[in-house]
Image (cartoon, rainbow, N blue to C red):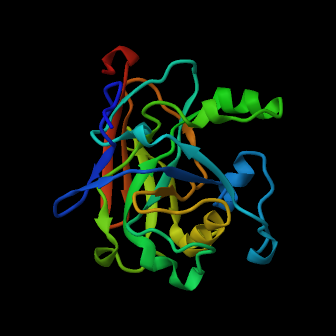
Amino acid sequence: MTDVIACAPQPRIPVRGGGMFPVRRIYCVGRNFAEHAREMGAPAPASKADRGQPVFFLKPADAIVIDGVVPYPPGTTDLHHEVELVVALGKDAAPGLVDPDGADALIFGYGIGLDLTRRDLQAAAKAKGLPWDTGKAFDHSAPVSELVRASDVGDLASRALSLKVNGETRQRAALSDLIWDVPDILHALSKLYALRAGDLVFMGTPAGVGALQVGDAFVASLDGIVELRGEIHAAHHAV
């Protein structure tokens, strides 16, 4: 059947070595590093036995930015960076719960990304007990690097992620410090959603989140694997 309006192309991310990864959904994990939970005024588990359930929210697939050009968003004066491991799923999960022991079979590859946040809007919504979608799910809020195939990455626990802004290190943490690791998160997500090929999971940010201003240059890194370089532009530069 013919579409009655022109449809935007499906968002896609370059893959190292060739090809493009079409994005279906973007799932994000909140409070997945203990020190970040504390800096946001939330309790952090003393041990894995006390960790409870992960916090999830979503961003639209077309929030991705692959060229590093990030226009400063409207409606905020407090744009914050949150550097995160990005997991890309290459297979549909079978119906039912994802077994953590088999979760790696769903993974196509990994990247590094920023969960950009309109912190003032998020804080205002939280204070009123309201949803904080406008603080998280906005245009250009998910800059992401190229994806690297899982077979070329190896063990994640030995890696660290980091973010520099204007040459200064703002965030750095070992992935072994995640409260919920990747198999844990895929298992928990499968309780709520049908996971499909094309889904991205932003795995949560370490401590050190802070403001970004027009003109700031950033470099996000997944140790020895991949980098994301970009800059915050004035809003009128956006197309």
**In this image, 37 relative to 206: left or right?**
right
The residue located at (74%, 52%) in the rendering is 38
Decide if residue 148 is in sight here.
yes
Q: Farthest residue toward the left? A: 18
**In this image, 193 relative to 124: left or right?**
left
Expressed as whole percent of the image width and height from the top left, the position of residue 92 reads: 45, 68
Q: In this view, does 200 lie above or below 103?
A: above
Q: Farthest residue toward the top? A: 236
Tell me the quadrant of the picture where the N terminus can be found: top left
Towards the viewer: 5 or 204: 5
The residue located at (53%, 46%) in the rendering is 82
The residue located at (83%, 34%) in the rendering is 129
Q: Is residue 99 above or below residue 84?
A: below
The residue located at (37%, 67%) in the rendering is 90
Towards the viewer: 182 or 179: 182
Q: Farthest residue toward the front? A: 1
Query: How many circles with numbers are drawn on the protein?
Result: 0
Expressed as whole percent of the image width and height from the top left, the position of residue 16 reads: 21, 61
Quadrant position of residue 166: top left
Towards the viewer: 91 or 122: 91
**In this image, 4 relative to 121: left or right?**
left
Q: Is residue 116 above or below residue 35?
A: above
